[in-house]
Image (tube, rainbow, N blue to C red):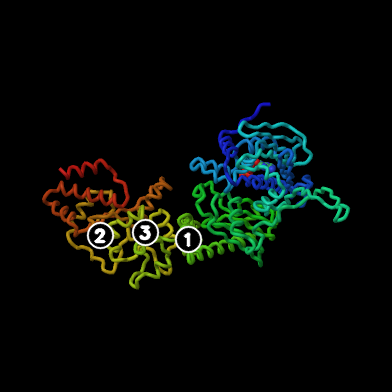
Amino acid sequence: MEKTQFKSESKRLLDLMINSIYTHKEIFLREIISNASDAIDKLFFVSLTDDKVGLNREDFKIKLALDKENRTITVSDNGIGMDKNDLENNLGTIASSGSYKFKQENEKTDDVDIIGQFGVGFYSAFMVSSEIKVITKKYGNDTAYIWESTGADGYTITETEKDEVGTTIIIKVKEDTENEKYSDYLEQYRISALVTKYSDYIRYPIVMKNEHKKMIEGTMDDPQFEVVAEDEILNSMVPIWQRSKKDVTAEEYNEFYKQKFFDFEDPMHVISTSVEGVVTYKSLLFIPNRVPFNYYTKEYKRGLQLYSSGVLIMESCEDLLPEHFAFVKGVVDSQDLSLNISREMLQHDRQLKTIASNIEKKIKNELAALLKNDRDKYEKFFANFGRQLKFGIVSDYGAHKEAVKDLVLFYSSTEKKLVTLKEYVERMGEEQKEIYFATGDSIENIDRLPQIEGMRDQGIEILYCPEQIDEFAMQGIGEYDGKMFKNIVNDDIDTPDGDDEKKDDVEVLTFIKNLLGDKVNDVVFSKKLKTHPVCMTAKGGVSFEMEKYMAIAQPEAKVKAERVLEINASHPAVNSLIANMTADKEKAEKYAKLLYSQALLIAGLQLEDPSEYAELVCSLMV
Ligand code: ADP
């Protein structure tokens, strides 16, 4: 019979599996068992509303059987099963997000370790097997199918007969090699230990026939044995979140997290809670140690897995997790929720709202504690998800700012590290009334901005805001501890010993303004410049950073900051310009244009005409 080839990317993965030298090949069993459990979940869910399934909760199980002679491990489930289409789509290609992720990562790293860290599902069985058979019948179908493959050369699908709905997977175990004793997987004790290690929490019984000798008659001196086979349940079936915190090891939590949420790194932080009262629930939450590859995209789905008394009712419940904590992964299990509640009903469910609000508080408190007790760890977290927190302040018209404002960090000009707003305010001098911040495109560039030089040199603490969201976040918070925020790049500041406005010769201002026309809204003498001749500031509510942001986010709105060219009347370059206004008007104009261009460049703005600027510089050089 003709073999169907695997899709190319699946084939690559398969080759990797077959030739894997990965040391933890044992994870294949957990992958197969968790697929079986998922399949049972699906049929159980159907059975809640469809009597025809004819199975009760306690009828569902996963069976394991070992056959040393034929070198096979058989895993059967009475779950939803697969039809021909499912077989082609699910076992012929990489469909799962987990595998897809693997493929992406692997293209870059070629790191085989990823296999063991979070598994790549069904395919991992090829690490220990030379031949796999899947016999399956889907619920609602009469025809059953056998899918067979010996690996790289493709697979076949044929019709067959099968009484029960569900799936049986027969894994032919490879022959032993010098380095690898595959035969171990045919031993009861080994398989039983693997189930305890990786699949203990699976909510359906995993049963295996335990063959042992039993004395049937005779005496101790002359015993008569019979081999009996009894079904033994290998797993405790208690989900990890139902177990008491003190009975679960860090390794178990980490293992659970990686398996469940397709990560290959341990989580950074685990939060386990058990609440009894108005609502009763258990939750197990994780903060990842790294940013998921699709995190800041539309594809990323925030939400927690929702269970009702151990039964999964929703894969990703958005309503349980506020936007600003979207990075949290985890599960919530409550006996107070009805099993067949619809999504629409859930949104209005009072219990769920209470749980969600408790969870938000819990995460907030945990993060605050981390910030207080383990600053390094918190800063690592903030590097990953700080942006999300700032987005959280801005979203929903600032409705959540109270929850987040003490969790955000900004870079301080005096401390040279990230600080909280609380720390800033506590250090503020008596005479300082506002929280000063400066926007720009990087810490280094902000530090070099002409207009902050004066304050910086006086040792006044300034928060540097290199991310576009920073300024929105400041605006979102509005005030902290009664102090307003002030962008010192733009606004005038009454610094303690700020210069009085130069009352000199305003002629130069008119001269420059007339020359530049609409390119600037105003030309003024600066109060804040020290060693620099000019700077460009934005007047009014829109800053340059916001203008740049809006140019990308909403180009049609054509949001423009009001440009104010500030000049330093005591700078020699400006004096030279003033002197030339009468001596050599043409030269004075060139100087003015040059200073204007400089101001634009330093502010991180584009020159309208770079080649004109180049010509200008050259003409002044010759
Ligand atoms: P993943 O489980 O990450 O989706 P797998 O490669 O393990 O990836 O499985 C691919 C798909 O094959 C599953 O998503 C599921 O639809 C189907 N599948 C695998 N095993 C079974 C099973 N025992 N019963 C029903 N469907 C299964």
- Residue at (74, 52) in percent of width and height: 233
Q: In this figure, which residue is indicated by the disc labeled 2?
A: 529
> x%, y% of residue 124?
62, 42
> x%, y% of residue 134?
70, 38
Identity, as a three-letter code, of the amino acid under mark 2: Leu
* Image quarter for ligand 1: top right
Q: Is residue 319 visible?
A: no
Using residue 432 as the reference point, say whether residue 7 is left or right of it.
Answer: right
- Residue at (61, 63) in percent of width and height: 273
Tell me which label, 3 or 2, sits earlier in the chain.
Answer: 3
Mark 2 vs mark 1, foreground winner is: 1
Residue 586, above or below 529:
above
Q: In this figure, which residue is indicated by the disc labeled 3?
A: 464
The reply to whether discs 3 and 2 touch (Cβ–Cβ < 8 Å) is no
The reply to whether discs 1 and 3 touch (Cβ–Cβ < 8 Å) is no
Other-residue count near label 2 (Cα within 10 Å), few / some / many at <14 / 14–19 / ≥20: many
Q: Secondary structure at mark 1?
A: helix
Mark 1 vs mark 3, foreground winner is: 1
Q: In this figure, which residue is indicated by the disc labeled 1?
A: 378
Q: Nearer the viewer, residue 375 or 250?
A: 250
Identity, as a three-letter code, of the amino acid under mark 1: Tyr
Q: Is mark 1 within 8 Å of ligand 1?
A: no
Tell me which label, 2 or 1, sits earlier in the chain.
Answer: 1
Using residue 331 as the reference point, say whether residue 163 is left or right of it.
Answer: right
- Residue at (65, 53) in percent of width and height: 197
Q: Is residue 23 visible?
A: yes
> x%, y% of residue 590?
19, 47
Other-residue count near label 3 (Cα within 10 Å), few / some / many at <14 / 14–19 / ≥20: many
- CA distance for labels 2 and 1: 37 Å
- CA distance for labels 3 and 2: 18 Å
Q: Quadrant of the C terminus?
A: top left
